Image (cartoon, rainbow, N blue to C red):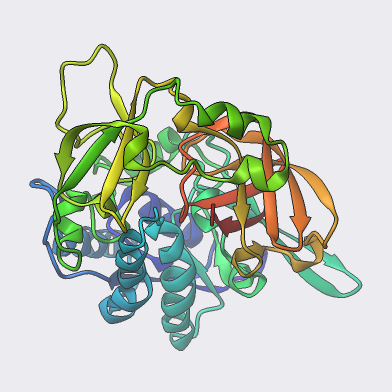
Amino acid sequence: MAVMAKVVVGLSGGVDSSVAAWLLKEQGHEVIGLFMRNWHDTTGTLEGDCPWHDDQVFAELVAKRLDIPFRYVDLSEQYKERVVDYMFAEYERGRTPNPDVLCNREIKFDVFLKEALKLGADFVATGHYCQKSEEVIDGHTTYSLLAGADTNKDQSYFLCQLTQEQLKYALFPIGHLTKPEVRAIAEAQKLATAKRKDSQGICFVGKVDLPVFLQQKLAARQGNIHEILPTWPKYERYAADNTLQGMARPYSYTVRDGKKIGTHNGAHFYTIGQRKGLGIGGRKESLFIIGTDVDSNTIYVGEGDNHPGLYRRALRIEHDEIHWINPNQALHYGESRHFEVRIRYRQPLQSATMYMEEDGAYIVFDTPQRGIAAGQFAAWYDGQKVVGSGVISA
């Protein structure tokens, strides 16, 4: 992007997007700051979490400091339909969604992008810690999504569902910088956001008490907690099944497999690997959730971080949930390929092999993985490049 372009920056009221806007202006581009309001309800948000109007005030202050036009758009209706309703539906099914991945695919680089194009934008820029490259082959340009230079802040996982068309318009001005470098630039330029804390929690909603937030749609319902011992005989049977289907099969418990040790307020409020919120003490080691059953409203727990119920060797993704950032790199039936994979943000990349089968894609890890849960996104990498992603079905 050597020539001057018109770039709409998603000013969020945070330091990252503020510095992204400054960098673009320094490069000589015509920059417009566009703030999006995506959520109105404060139900379940934790005390002290900054409301959206504070974000807008900071975004406006940055725009004034940079002397760039400032616009505002309310996308709360689309955000509710495409992200929040999906999140409620997934939790109701006993799955673990990642709303931030959906927010980027459905809102920031779809609805928001369209709003930016209405303003005549050539590109849309965000403050994500990731990078983009492009390559021209036979006159056709293909785009790649790369990890951010700051390994501690790399956010490429959150963008793992982007398409070629979305990447075509995307700019990530701070992707080559570290967080301390971004903070230093903001302070040097006297930006109002220089020392503002990073946002946490659900994209545009904030940090929430998840059960309270989910009770907007999902009723609390008391159920039982059953403990599964690490000596549960069926663990050996699972370990002995080395087929792709067997390695990816989730552990299936019944109330007869463990002793009741407590109660909870709804199986759909919990996820695999969770430790907090059980309210059961007096143990040498922490209790972790190793299984949930929303039909019987039962959750299963195991004691200790090394409990076998926390670990699995493989996962499966259904064909219609598989996404390739560059479709030309897609695997075909019967093919396999080695990738580095992560199933959650900040997880170190894990060595694995993907197998494309008739009933879906299987990812088999070199070492068993902790807390694999249906509904999570798995993203696979080739070096620094995000090759594809998909929703874990099992």
Q: x and y percent of residue 175 in the render?
A: 54, 48
Image quadrant of residue 335? bottom right
Q: Position of residue 116 (x, y in %)?
A: 44, 79
Query: Going by the picture, which residue comes out furthest to the top?
Result: 284
The correct choice, above or below, for 87 with respect to 195 in the image is below
Q: Residue furthest bottom?
A: 118
Q: Residue at x 28, y 21 (%)?
A: 286
| Residue 7, position as x, y percentages in the image | 50, 71
Q: Residue furthest left?
A: 47
Q: Position of residue 171 (x, y in %)?
A: 55, 62
Give whichever of 219, 84 is nearer the camera: 219
128 relative position to 380: left or right: left
Q: In front here: 386 or 26? A: 386
Q: From where the camera sits, is residue 385 visible?
A: no
> Residue drawn at (77%, 56%), measured in percent from left and top?
356
Please determine whether, in this image, residue 90 is positioned above or below residue 367: below
Q: Quadrant of residue 328?
A: bottom right
